[in-house]
Amino acid sequence: MRNILMTVMLLVVVILLFNNIITKDTTGTSSQITSQGEAANTKISQMLTSR
C-alpha cells in the first residue's frame, strides 16, 4: 500500500512540475519555443525578401 501511495505522490509531483515548467502561459518552455520560432521565421522571411 505504501508503494502505491509513493508512486501516486511522485506522479502528482511530476505533473505539477510539467505544468509549471513546460506549459505555463507566458514563461513556459512551450511559449518560449513558439516565440523564438516566430522570430526566426520573421528574420528568415525578411532576409529572403530583401534580395
Image (cartoon, grey):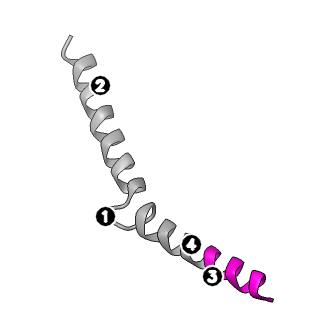
Which residue occupies 42% across, 63% down?
21
Residue at mark 1: 26
Mark 2–mark 3 distance (CA, rounded to whole Å)? 46 Å
Which of pointers 4 and 1 indicates the residue nearer the eye? 4
Mark 4–mark 3 distance (CA, rounded to whole Å)? 10 Å
Toward the viewer: 38 or 36? 36
Magenta span covers which residues? Answer: 1-11
Residue 43, relative to residue 17: is it above or below?
Answer: above
Which of pointers 4 and 3 indicates the residue nearer the eye? 3
Under mark 2, the amino acid is Ile
Residue at mark 2: 44
Residue at mark 3: 9
Under mark 1, the amino acid is Thr
Mark 2–mark 4 distance (CA, rounded to whole Å)? 36 Å
Crowding around mark 2 (Cα neighbors within 10 Å: few <14, some 14 to 19, many 20+) is few
Under mark 3, the amino acid is Met
Which residue occupies 62% across, 75% down?
10
Quarter holding the C terminus is: top left
Which x, y percent locates residue 31?
37, 56
Determine the main secondary structure of the stretch shown in magenta. helix
Which of pointers 3 and 1 indicates the residue nearer the eye? 3
Mark 2–mark 1 distance (CA, rounded to whole Å)? 24 Å
In the visual, does 49 lie left or right of 33? left
Labels 2 and 4: the sequence-earlier one = 4
Labels 3 and 1: the sequence-earlier one = 3
Labels 2 and 1: the sequence-earlier one = 1
Residue at mark 4: 15
Residue 5 lies in what quarter of the image?
Answer: bottom right
Labels 2 and 3: the sequence-earlier one = 3
Which of pointers 2 and 1 indicates the residue nearer the eye? 1
Label 4, secondary structure: give it: helix
Tags 4 and 1 touching, CB below 8 Å:
no
